[in-house]
Image: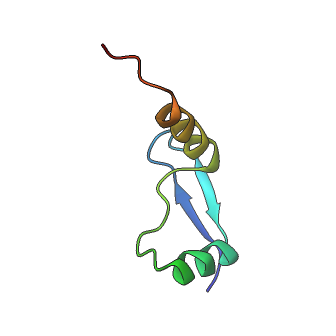
Amino acid sequence: MADKNLVCKDCGKEFLFTEGEQAFYKEKGFENEPQRCVECRKARKQQNNKPSFRK
């Protein structure tokens, strides 16, 4: 395996999917490559963890 350059689907920035990350994904059984860069993944995770104040 070699490092791969991928493009974030949110911001359009190129990011590196390292050989180590690829091995981790394979070990965990993930079939798809990441679609977001680290920054966008963090932002999305924060957004999803905000409590909802619906009445």
Q: Is residue 17 left or right of residue 34?
A: right
> Toward which corner of the image does residue 22 lie, by quadrant?
bottom right
Q: Of all residues shown, which one is farthest toward the bottom?
A: 1
Residue closest to the eye, 28 or 19: 28
Q: Residue at x 63, y 49 (%)?
A: 38
Left/right of residue 2 with respect to residue 6 in the rendered view:
right
Picture coordinates of residue 55, whole percent (x, y): 30, 13
Q: Nearer the viewer, residue 53 or 7?
A: 53
Give the image's coloring scheme. Answer: rainbow
Which picture quadrant has residue 2? bottom right
Q: Position of residue 43 (x, y in %)?
A: 57, 36
Residue plotted at (47% across, 36% down): 48
Q: Residue furthest front?
A: 55
Residue pictured at 58% horizontal, 50% vertical: 37
Q: Is residue 2 above or below residue 34?
A: below
Placement of the N terminus among the 4 image quadrants: bottom right
Q: Say which of 30 and 15 sits in front.
A: 30
